[in-house]
Structures are given as C-alpha cells and as structure tokens.
Amino acid sequence: MRGLTVETKELRFEASKSSGEVSAILIRPTQARWLLVLGHGAGAGMRHAFMENISQHLAANGIATFRYQFPYMEQGKKAPNPPPILMKTIRSAVATAAEIAGDLPILAGGKSLGGRMTSNAAASEAIPDVKGIVFFGFPLHAPGKPSSERGNHLFEVTVPMLFLQGTRDKLADLDYLKPLCDKLDMQAKLHIVEGADHSFRLPKKLNRTEDDVFAELAETVLHWAAKLGRI
C-alpha cells in the first residue's frame, strides 16, 4: 500500500517435532496495534494472492500478520496433515509470533481450513495469548451438503470469534451459519459480504473492486478487535 511503512521478515519455526520446520512471513506496520497469526486454506499456501492481499490491507489498518505454512504445504503435498499436526502447528505459530512481537495483543485464525483448525485447537485447549479468532470464510460444510456439524466445537471456544462470510459461499450456507452464530450469542460476530463467494470474489455486476472487498474485510477486523476488551 502506498505510503505504508512496514517491516517484512521471513523466518522458520518448528511446527512439531515430527513435522520439522516450516516457513513464515511477518508483516508489521510501524503503528501496529494487533498481531494476527494467519493460517492458509487447504489448497493454497501462505504466498497465495489472497493471503498476500489481506495481509497488506490489514497492515494498512494497523494490524500486523504472521502467516505460516502447514507442514504438508511446506513439503509440497496436496492432502492436509491430520488435525493433530495442523493444531500443533497453529500453537507453535502463535508461540513463535508472541516471542517475535510480544508487545502486541494477539489474534489468530485464517482462511478456510486455517481458521477452522485454529478454532478446533482453541476448543480442545485455550491457545495462550490469543484474544480472539478471525475466520476468512469458515468452511461449515462440504459443497452442496449444508450442515452445521463442523461448527459444534465452536461452543467450546472461550474467546470471541469473527466470521467474515460471503453470501455465495458454497461451504457455508447462511441458513445454517446465522443460527449457529445466534446460538454463540456474544461470543460470535458475523459480517456478511454481499455477493462474495468462498474466496471473496464478486460478480462484475456489483461494480466493486477486489481492493474494495479486502479493505472491507480488514476494516471489519480492526473495528471488531477494538471492541474486544468490552466483550
């Protein structure tokens, strides 16, 4: 972003003893107020255009990001690791991020799989230092198979959660996601992007640019984070 002063650092950390080291990228704007530990989706790693774009727009809103690879992606494999490995990686990523930028309050989450595995990890045992979880397209169910079962674990999460969802997301039918968020009550905030699909792409007829959408997502995260102390 023009006029934005940021520190960018590439590093590695141990995901788990069995999986070895993985790559990570820290982007920290000069006036950072939060740090979001950001996991990627199932089919694309931390250098995917979505991950890069959302990191830049978050930086423009004073939110640093620590995005990282899951072991399978680091190793060039297509199939995600078993959930225990993914969740260990998330805990290691948060711990590493806290050491690097320990002066910033920490959020965690990610795109699709990265977000869902973060909440699964937090449901099994609270992740130290994490103040809230951000989902960029929560994958509530498989395409064409609406269900809310994948969201059952969310009731065990003890920190606030922000759901950023598109109305055309085939992995999260809003007829199922809205009632789920209602049941989570003050624990969940649902922000809907009209016309967006699971990747937050919009139909051309809406006359909104990609930058418009990423700016909306980043600003929503900032406004939600600013209220966390009052939730």
Image (cartoon, rainbow, N blue to C red):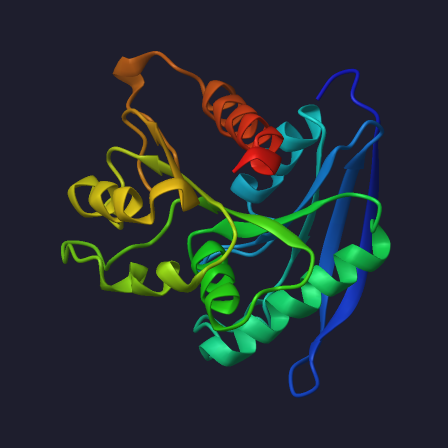
User: Outermost residue toward the top?
Assistant: 207
Residue drawn at x 81%, y 53% is: 10
Residue 166, horizontal then vertical, whole percent? 31, 34
In which quadrant of the rendered image does the N terminus lie? Answer: top right
**Residue 16 appears left or right of 111:** right
Up-down: is 157 above or below 84?
above
Q: Is residue 74 visible?
A: no
Up-down: is 69 above or below 30?
below
**Toward the viewer: 67 or 159?**
159
Residue 151, horizontal then vertical, whole percent? 31, 59
Residue drawn at x 40%, y 43% is: 188
Residue 59, picture quadrant: top right
User: Outermost residue toward the bottom?
Assistant: 18
**Toward the viewer: 47 or 70?**
70
Residue 161, horizontal then vertical, whole percent? 46, 46
Q: Is residue 229 visible?
A: yes
Residue 13, horizontal then vertical, whole percent? 77, 69
**Residue 41 appears left or right of 192:** right
Residue 72, picture quadrant: bottom right
